[in-house]
Image: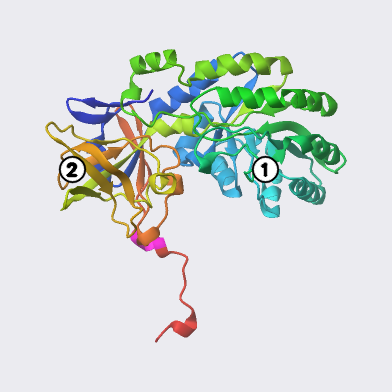
Amino acid sequence: MHSFHYRGGKLFCEGTSVQALAEKHGTPLYIYSQETLEHHFQALDSALRPLDHRICFSVKANSNLAVLRLLANLGAGFDIVSEGELRRVIAAGGNAASCVFAGVGKTEREIEFALRRNIYCFNAESAAELARISRVAVRLKKIAPVAVRINPNVEAHTHAKVTTGTYRNKFGIQLEDVEGVYARAARLPCLRLRGLQMHIGSQLMATEPFERAVRKVLPLVGRLAVRYGLEFFNIGGGLGIVYEPALASGSPAWWKSAAARGLLTPARYAERLAPLLKPLGLKILLEPGRFIVGNAGILVARVQYVKQTGRKTFVIVDAAMNDLMRPALYDSYHEIIPVAQRHGKWLPSDVVGPVCESADCFCKDRPLPKVGEGDCLALLSAGAYGFVMASNYNARPLAAEVLVHGRHAALVRRRQDIAQTWAGEKIPHWLKGK
């Protein structure tokens, strides 16, 4: 569920007018709903109550400090993949001791920084990485907590660019080699074998791939837990969200019917996995990102022109692929709705941005109500992998971000000034005066 809805023909985020926010802060504009963030976190946390568990929010999904602080206040841990993300968690008031550090390419500097901040655990993805962590820990005279990431070779049947759990992917250590890797790691100095981790992919809308992966690795997890005194089993993230129909999915009634049809919900996820995991007697970690923030955010864009080319209608907006990369990168669907409802004829339209690339397109030939210059459109389900993937391509400044709480709204990132897009650059002295 989410808290975006029409009221009197106008789009609202909770109790706040989206149009009013666009007029005050300009466009393109990201808007996040605190109520939705809280609801999604608490629904998952409550469903997993039968297990000793910790939800580690995947910072790569949305790293705004206000979002991270809100989740830290709710008791979240964090899944990080860089020193920068760890620094963001700390800056937001999160606890480094509740962070798990993932990623296949951790540098010595990143490992050292994380060790000095006493993170909860490294998710190691290769034998070479375990050796590096050991060397850094020896140098710092610290004990490094580690978990090995298993690649269970389970096909998640999701988009090819977000699947992570097969032997075609760069992530983790293949299942058959894991016991040998643990045996060698146990002999390395200054390592503490704390747990075991896996993650099979993103945007999964059924429980079956999760169940299949858990069942496949359970015997191994049990053996390693006894042999090395492991504390936790990290089952990764991957819970999907509804992109279509995103607006309708804000309704509790819609979710009730969807649950009856077998759609993935926190309750269904826990119902199928908890009986498998509870007998392990281990703490269960999971790393959701998109599930918590995806439907909690929208991107608001203003129509600049409506252009007719033969039979094609192009709605040209001020948001672009540099603001929301997912459609260009993944051919992903985002529902697009007018901020002020329109009645009358719907036209097949391409909603496109101003960036000089044919890929700068949010939808093609999609039926949309007739809109005109100055109207605002909302791209739904933009809370995850939206702003975090933004760039300054075409020397475009980064968008502003707003967090809404009921009738209150706070600017949680001001719009980037154009001059900031070249801050840090320098012209060498031999080119000056030419």
Residue at the limit of the structure toward the bottom, as seen here: 434
Q: Secondary structure at mark 1?
A: loop
List x then y, in percent, for residue 240. 48, 29
List x then y, in percent, for residue 123. 68, 39
Q: CA distance from mark 2 to mark 1?
A: 48 Å
* Image point (72%, 14%), residue name: 279
Amino acid type shown at disc 1: Arg
Amino acid type shown at disc 2: Asp
Q: Would you say 75 lies left or right of 11 here?
A: right
In terms of depth relative to the viewer, which is nearer, 339 or 215? 215
Q: Disc 2 designates what residue? A: 375
Task: Look at discs 2 and 1 and give the one toward the viewer.
Answer: 2
Look at the image and tell me whether residue 316 can be seen. Answer: yes
Q: Secondary structure at mark 2?
A: loop
Confirm whether the magenta stretch covers residue 420: yes
The numbered mark at residue 285 is: none
Magenta highlight: main SS? helix
Q: Quadrant of residue 78?
A: top right
* Image point (48%, 26%), residue name: 205
Which of the image's four quarters has the N terminus? Answer: top left
Q: Disc 1 designates what residue? A: 117
Residue at the limit of the structure toward the front, as seen here: 311
Q: Quadrant of residue 363?
A: top left
List x then y, in percent, for residue 163. 56, 38
* Image point (33%, 56%), residue name: 358
Q: Residues within 10 Å of mark 2 (few under 14, many from 20)?
A: some
Look at the image and tell me whether residue 48 can be seen. Answer: no
Pointer 2 with pointer 1, Cβ within 8 A: no
In terms of depth relative to the viewer, which is nearer, 281 or 220? 220
Q: Would you say 175 lies left or right of 240 here?
A: right
Residue range (magenta): 417-421
* Image point (61%, 31%), residue name: 236
